[in-house]
Amino acid sequence: MDESPMQANPAHAAPMVCTVLPTYNEGDNIEPLIRGVLAHALTPHMVLVVDDDSPDGTWQVVERLMGELNRGGEVRVALLRRRHERGLTSAIQRGIDTAIHTFGAGIVTWMDCDLSMPPASVPDLVRAIVEDGADLVAGSRWVPGGADIAHGLMARSLSWIINRFAMLLLGAQVHDYTSGFISGRAAVFERIRLRGDYGEYCIDLLVRARRAGFAVSEVAYVCVPRTAGDSKTGANLWDYLVKGRKYAATILRLAVQRY
C-alpha cells in the first residue's frame, strides 16, 4: 500500500505489540524475518514494514505475505511504502506513529532487518516490559550473555569504545547505547520523538527516556552475521569513522544539555 496502512486490529486484553521493520533492499531477508517475529510472539503481535521504495522489490515480498497472512480481518503484516522519503530514523518514527495511532499498539519494537538481530530475541525485550515493568528496553551486546559475532574486530572495537565513552559521560545504567534493537511502551514514544540521522538516534532516545523518568533496562542478545544482502552499518574504516563522529557529537551534546 502507498502511504495508507490498513485499519487496526480489534482491541485485545493483552498489550498489542507492533514490530516496525525499516527496510531498504532487504528482499532476501524480509520474509524469514517477518515469519520469525510472528512465530515467536508472546502476545498479540503484528509487523509493520516501512520500506523506502526498495529497488529490489522488498515491498513486493511484503505485499505477498500480507495476502497470505492477513486473514479474517486480522492484520498480522502491514506495509508503508515511502516513495518520497528516505532515512533510517524517519522511517522508524513513521512506523512508531502508525503503530500507535493507526493500529493501537501498546508496545512498539524495532530491529535491523538483516537478521543480525534474531527474531527469537524479540520476546525477551517484550517480556522485560510486560513482566518486569520496564518502559524502554534495549537489546544489548555488552552485558553478560550478549555478544557481537556479526562484525569484525575493527567494528566491534569502535562500538565498544563509543559505548564506554557514552557510559562515562551519560551513565553506566546502559551498556549498549548504540543498540538499535528496541522495545518500548507507547507512552514513551508519545512523549519522546526520535532525533538524529542514523544510529545516534538510539543514544539520544535512551538518555532522554531515562532523564524523563522512564524505567530503562537492557536484555542480552547475540548479534549474528547477516545471511544476505549488503551491510549498511559500515562499508569501510572511513564510513565507521564518519558515523562514529556523529555518535561522539551526540554523546557530548547530551552530556552538556540536561534535557
Image (cartoon, helix red, strand yellow):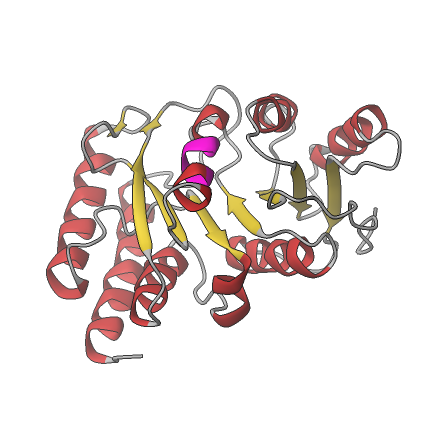
Q: Is residue 246 above or below residue 158?
A: below
State whether residue 35 is above or below residue 231: above
Most foreground residue, 36 or 250? 36
Residue at 67% across / 43% down in the picture? Answer: 48
Q: Is residue 95 above or below residue 223?
A: below
Q: Which residue is pictured at 70% across the width and 38% down the height?
A: 55
Pinpoint residue 189: horizontal percent, then vertical percent: 51, 63
- Relative placement, left or right, of 232 versus 158 is right
Q: Is residue 78 magenta?
A: no
Identity of the residue furthest to the front in this view: 13
Relative vertical location of residue 79 with respect to residue 258 in this rendering, above or below: above
Quarter of the C terminus within the rendering: bottom left
- The location of residue 24, given as percent across then percent down, is 61, 41
- Classify residue 34 by image quadrant: top right
| Residue in the foreground of this view, choosing between 131 and 83 | 131
Asked if residue 212 lies left or right of residue 110, the reply is: left
Number of residue marks: 0
**Farthest right residue in view:** 72
Q: Nearer the viewer, residue 117 or 120?
A: 120
Give the residue drawn at x 57%, y 60%: 93
Q: Main secondary structure of the magenta part?
A: helix
Can you tell which quarter of the image residue 18 is in? top right
Image coords of residue 131 (percent x, y):
42, 41
User: What span is in magenta?
Assistant: 122-126
Q: x, y percentage for residue 214? A: 36, 63
Taking the spot 13% from the left edge, 51% from the top edge, the residue there is 164
- Of residues 62 and 99, the one drawn nearer to the viewer in this rendering: 99
